[in-house]
Image (cartoon, helix red, strand yellow):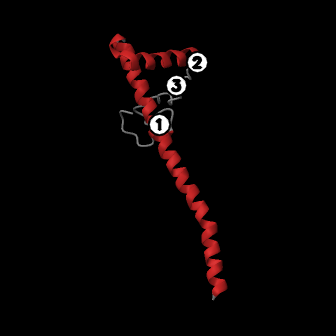
Amino acid sequence: PGCGNINWARRTICNSKTCEARAKEKGSWAPQSDAEKIQENMELRQRFAKDRTSLTPVELERAESLIARDEKKKQKKLVHEFAKAKRDSKKKKKPSQDLDKEARVSKD
């Protein structure tokens, strides 16, 4: 709040005697798109790919944000897949390493 209270993050109302400001509602998830909106977004992406000059400025902005979001999701998925593959490869190496240790022990 304007009074500079450092405990503000935990409170719904500022406890300063001179301020008593109310906290804003905490953010919530945006409503999920219904089937109609999903279809509309898909068509907008297709129209953008085919001929972006046919879009209104509002449609163009929306299409660009959808495509940027798609790309961000794709990159995030690749990072997760890479991390999973790396974890899986480490798991596969462990049993063979144990066998190598056993083989060395039995030779000694």
Within 10 Å of disc 1 (Cα), the crowding (few <14, some 14-19, many 20+) is: few
Give the Cα distance between marks 1 and 2. 22 Å
**For discs 3 and 2, the disc positioned in front in the rendered view:** 2
Q: CA distance from mark 3 to mark 2?
A: 12 Å
Is tag 1's residue or tag 2's residue first in the polypeptide sequence?
2
Q: Earlier in the sequence, mark 1 or mark 3?
A: 3
Task: Say the numbered circle drawn on residue 51.
Answer: none
> Residue 53, image x and y in percent?
32, 13
Amino acid type, label 3 = Ala
Which residue in the protein does label 3 denote?
30
Q: Amino acid at mark 2?
A: Asp
Helix, strand, or loop for circle 3?
Answer: loop
- Which SS class for mark 2? loop
Residue 28 left/right relative to 58: right
Badge 1 amino acid: Lys
The reply to whether discs 1 and 2 touch (Cβ–Cβ < 8 Å) is no
Q: Which residue is mark 1?
A: 74
Q: Is residue 4 above or below residue 85?
A: above
- Label 3 environment density (alpha carbons within 10 Å; few <14, some 14–19, many ≥20): few
**What is the CA distance from the residue labelled 1 to the residue labelled 3?**
21 Å
Residue sitting at x 40%, y 29%: 68
Quadrant for the N terminus in the image: top left
Say which of 32 and 17 sits in front: 32
Q: Could you tell me which residue is drawn at 50 percent across and 40 percent down? A: 77
Residue 76, given in percent of the width and then of the height, sits at: 47, 40
Q: Quick one: SS at disc 1?
A: helix
Residue 20 versus residue 26: which sits nearer the camera? 26
Residue 73, horizontal then vertical, whole percent: 47, 35
Q: Nearer the viewer, residue 21 or 33?
A: 33
Q: Position of residue 29 (x, y in %)?
A: 53, 28
Point out which mark residue 34 bears: 2
